[in-house]
Amino acid sequence: MPSLGQTTDELRITAWLKAEGDAIALAEPILEVETDKAVLQVESSYAGTLLKILHHAGEVVPAGEPIAVIGQAGEAIALDSVSPTQPIDAAQQPNPPAVPATAGSDQVLATPIARKMAKELGLDLRAIQGSGPGGRIERRDVEAWVAANAATPAKHNIVRDDGAGHGAVPRHRQIIAQRLTRSVQTIPQITLNMTVDARAARSLVAARRAAGLAGLTVTHLLLQAVARALRAQPLMNRVWQPDGPTFRRLARTDVGLAVASDDNLLVVTLPEPDRLDLAALVRVADEAIQRARKGALSQADVAPTAITISNLGMYHVDSFQAIVDPDQSMILAVGRIADQIVAIEGGIYIVPQMTLSLSVDHRVADGAAAAKFLKAICDDLERINA
């Protein structure tokens, strides 16, 4: 079981994507696990045949614990020799008993989004017929089942919120609540606000869109500006580690991006946005966002970062204070671009402005260092060339 860079050392297996006897390719997704952030696909580090599954769906497994054996087809194995540090010796081992028909929903083959929908609706996946490869249950199958059985929701234990606060709390909301509570309780946070003259950024976005880059937004410019600021100020590209205590220095200038999806909130990691041209960044970001909304994040999508960008400007929010993720040291809250009446060198002008609010783990950086970092981001946006 990989650690996946999470705050927890234990991960819950939600589904195996391969069965014993299946051929496995290098880097092919073989199972899905639930961390304290999201449901992720785990890729195989080896090629061969899946000889034995040691831990099944629904089990919580510590990082580093063997979860499966991959070898040559027909190869015999001795499970008592399987450990994180020892090789696998050849020997005969009987197969485990077959999973009975009364197995729980966690042992049913289903896509992450289908599993998520069924969990939130209180549905038993065993009651749904899958239309995907190998009978895998997909989103359309859950939607079709709900449509066909909408007349008798109570019979099937569908959980609904009545608007008065009653109803079960989905697991992903529980996880969000736990993480944010831990952040507020354990991280001493300070927030700095700066107003950006957004004329240059707005002009660049308009010009590139007119030239054919339709998906470009100010968020993409912010991703690059933040990455450049991290590269220029490496002491800000670190995270507090309570054991020690020590700092975890990050070698790459990756940047997190908050993604809202239905009733969920995820953070995807964008790889060094300052090294990508805008067209490539738009594509990479869009693909990562789509994976997040489908519940199919990869290990690279949750790589460690020191900072996340959270943009609520599209919802007409002027400014807000965000909460630092427990795994990070900063979060940049972005408000909308709005025309403001501004006095400049004795003249009165209408200027598009945007407020950036940087919340920082005070153990990692003092106010002066945080202000310098935020100023670098603002200067980058104001000097950007269309």
Image (spheres, rainbow, N blue to C red):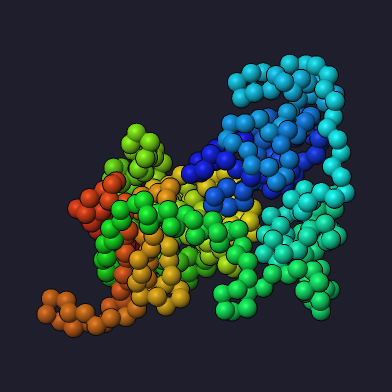
Along the line of sight, which residue is nearer the eye, 290 or 157?
Answer: 157
Mark count:
0
Q: Report whether residue 369 is seen.
A: no
At 32% from the left and 58% from the top, the residue drawn is 359
> In this rendering, would 230 be left or right of 151?
left
> In this rendering, would 245 be left or right of 295?
left
Q: Give residue 60's position: percent from left, percent from top.
A: 64, 42
Judge whether 51 appears above or below 172 on screen. above
Q: Quadrant of the image for the N terminus?
A: top right
Q: In which quarter of the view is residue 168 placed?
A: bottom right
Q: Give residue 203's position: percent from left, percent from top.
A: 37, 71
Q: Quadrant of the image for the C terminus?
A: bottom left
Q: Report whether residue 239 is seen.
A: yes
At 69% from the left and 55% from the top, the residue drawn is 112
At 73% from the left and 54% from the top, the residue drawn is 111
Along the line of sight, which residue is nearer the eye, 135 or 159?
Answer: 159
Q: In which quarter of the view is residue 334 placed?
A: bottom left
Judge whether 42 appears above or below 51 on screen. below
Which residue is situated farthest in the front direction here?
A: 166
Q: Give residue 74's position: percent from left, percent from top.
A: 85, 24
Judge whether 68 appears above or below 255 on screen. above
Q: Give residue 206's position: percent from left, percent from top.
A: 43, 71
> In this rendering, would 115 be left or right of 215?
right
At 87% from the left and 45% from the top, the residue drawn is 100
